[in-house]
Image: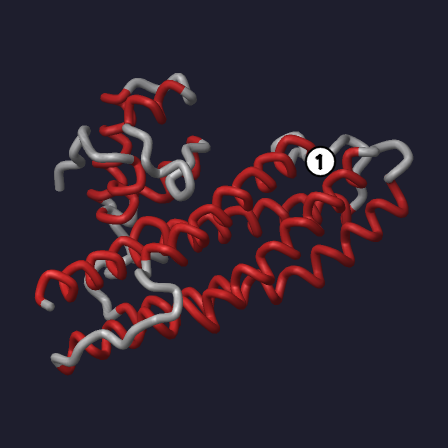
Amino acid sequence: MKVAQEKTVGEIAAENPTSVRVFESLGIDYCCGGKRSLADACSQTGLGVADLLKRLEEAAGNARETVAEGWNEAPLARLIAHIVDHHHAHVRNETPRLETMLSKVVGRHGEKHPEVRKIRRLFAVLIEELTTHMLKEEQILFPYIEKMEQATDTGKPIPPAFFGSVARPVAHMVADHDDAASLLESIRSEANNYVPPADACGTFRALYAGLEEFERDLKRHVHLENNILFPRATKLEQIHDRAA
């Protein structure tokens, strides 16, 4: 499989699921920053485009099942179920655990390491925004996308929505993703790229490991929406509009 150099990072991640791990290992944003070219992405890593292409080709050659495998062809309803059952659930399941560890670490290390206080505040804002965001998706946008798909499968017109075009809520969700990405970047910066200080206790180290995994899962979550679900839903609506 040949990775096309002219494609954006997000397009490559959507078409070649094995590329996700390569991008993650290099710190390349393939979700909210997915509209960048490979050359732009490489400029931030110090890696040449040819070297990155080689890594992507090697990853594809050693392809194994990944979180995004097959989502370009799968029914949208199944993709939505995966996002809700896996990624939304991850946010909800991990939040109480991370909040508990944050409280313990702030209580024990907050005086010497004031950055953990900032991390707790940033994480609280992130979770508040994600909670509202996920509810909007689950109660409004996702059900409508499923109705569009059902209408297509049965040859019926798409039911009207109070928000008009699906592009409108999609734009709001993408903007929310950008806000979340900014908060994640701030948390990572305060946490020194999740490298715990030398005097960190076990809880401190577990906290940083948990926050890093939370970020990794959220980026894959956003990738599935920004680069696969939303473009496919928008295209589906456009096809119906042309046929009407």
Q: Residue at image x 47%, y 46%?
A: 175
Q: Nearer the viewer, residue 59 or 171?
A: 171
Q: Picture quarter containing residue 23?
A: top left
Q: Picture quarter containing residue 53?
A: top left
Q: Relative to 158, is 97 above or below?
A: above
Residue 172 x %, y %: 45, 52
**Can see residue 47?**
yes
SS at mark 1 in the image: loop
Q: Relative to 195, is 80 above or below?
A: below
Residue 224 x %, y %: 36, 55
| Residue type at tag 1 | Pro
Q: Nearer the viewer, residue 84 or 208?
A: 84
Q: Residue at image x 24%, y 70%?
A: 75
Is residue 105 found left or right of 158 in the rendered image?
right
**Can see residue 66?**
no
Is the residue marked by circle 1 packed among few (<14), some (14-19), or many (20+) residues within 10 Å?
some
Q: Quadrant of the N terminus?
A: top left
Q: Picture quarter containing residue 19?
A: top left
Q: Residue at image x 37%, y 18%?
A: 43
Residue designated by label 1: 196
Say how the picture is coloured: secondary structure
Residue 68 x %, y %: 32, 56
Q: Residue at image x 22%, y 43%?
A: 60
Residue 142 x %, y %: 39, 69
Is residue 147 found left or right of 173 in the rendered image?
left
Q: Quadrant of the C terminus?
A: bottom left
